[in-house]
Image (cartoon, grey):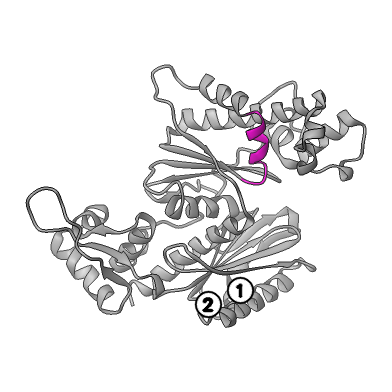
Amino acid sequence: MDGGGHGGGRGLGARALLSLISTGPMSRGDLGERLGLSPATTTRTVRPLIEVGLIEEQPPVETSGPGRPTRLLAVVADSATVAGIKLTADRLYAVLTDPLGEVLIGDTLPLNRTDAGSVTSLIASVVARLAERSGRRPDAIGISLGAAVVGRRTVVVASFLGWRDVPLAAMVAEATGLPCAVANDVRAFAYAEAWFGAGRGKDPFALVTLGAGIGCGIVVGGEIVSGARGAAGSVGHLPVDSSGPSCEIGHPGCARALASTAGIVRAAAVHLGCEEKDLSLERLLSPDLRQDAGVDDVLRRAALAVGRVVGTLIAYVDPELVVVSGEGVAVVETHRETFEKEVEGLRHWAAAAVPVLLRPFEFDEWARGAAALALEQWTTVAGDR
């Protein structure tokens, strides 16, 4: 997480709400154990949340053994609405979701102007339009982008937008009147996958994304590992093949040079003797170009590079599950056996194999991840009011 955590600075009500969002329905006993509270304190914490309609007690769940049926606590689906915004170099993706991660409505717009002021105005306008269309005004906004972010507020550097030291959260909060949080897009995506997707209940959980860059998000105890300077998971420039090509800033054989979209297209263009602008990842994956041995070798080396990143990640973290996603995941699918062999080859002989899921990808998922950031903002306000 970029400069925050589930516990630090949060009251018990906010912590209870966030635990139920990130973990799902649970009994009072399980919630108390998760929060480190006594049964009496747990009851005192959840009672006001039930009274104001933020939490509900679900119908009893019958148990096979003796004792009373268990009643689970859950966040009420219509208790809040949050907005998630994902920024790319040329587009804005937006969604409204409920606290259960369900997308209510979405939109996408071109970024015709990328200065911070224009982007802020566009965010304010799309959030207002989604609120009008859905009839649900959001309670908070989350924004994700491929950038280094400090304190969930300031974009230190976003090269693709030409930004440095932009106080984006404050700018959007002033323009909309809503609490706002900003984070690196991979970490936000990892939140959504850990809370609402395949990573729910997996601890630790890791997500690797493939696309314009190579990124990684690691979730431990429901929290993103951010690092001392917000740079944890920056795996794109790790060396994976000393004989490979160099990336755009001169690192020989790094993961980005071999397995990013630009790296793959660049290598294929060199082989085919054509301009990079004449190729795309989709075209390289087409059956006619896949028949070209040189193109297929570029794809194989990309899958091998991703396998080395994932295998190394598993060796260091030992997660319960790794999800590989992003627009480049189809490249790994083309040489899945190569990828899996590399992951397996990096496993310690005494360690159990870790499941790796290759997951299809939509850009809305990035925006949904940003909405998870907004949910954290909402719980801080709603849980302790």
Magenta stretch: give its range. Answer: 326-335
Tag 2 secondary structure: loop
Question: Is there a contact, CB below 8 Å, between mark 2 and mark 1?
Answer: yes
Percent from the top left, x then y, of residue 205? 44, 42
Closest to the observer, 364 or 111: 364
Number of numbered tags placed on the structure image: 2
Closest to the observer, 136 or 158: 136
Identified by mark 1, the residue type is: Val
- In the image, 201: left or right of 149? left
Q: Earlier in the sequence, mark 2 or mark 1?
A: 1
Magenta stretch containing residue 329, yes or no?
yes
Closest to the observer, 380 or 191: 191
Most extreme residue toward the front is: 287
Residue occupied by mark 1? 172
> How far is mark 2 from mark 1, CA to CA?
8 Å
Q: Quadrant of residue 57?
A: bottom left
Look at 44% across and 64% down and name the residue there.
Answer: 376
- In the image, 155: left or right of 261? left
Q: Is residue 192 above or below residue 306?
A: below
Give the label on residue 6, or none: none
Q: Quadrant of residue 150?
A: bottom right
Give the label on residue 178, or none: 2
Percent from the top left, x then y, of residue 318? 42, 32
Q: Does residue 231 show up? A: yes
Look at 25% across and 78% down and name the residue there.
Answer: 51
Identified by mark 2, the residue type is: Leu
Tag 1 secondary structure: helix
Percent from the top left, x then y, of residue 129? 63, 79
Magenta stretch containing residue 269, yes or no?
no
Category of crowding for the residue at label 2, using alpha-carbon neighbours closer than 10 angstroms: few (below 14), some (14–19), many (at least 20): many
Category of crowding for the residue at label 1, using alpha-carbon neighbours closer than 10 angstroms: few (below 14), some (14–19), many (at least 20): many
- In the image, 26: left or right of 274? left
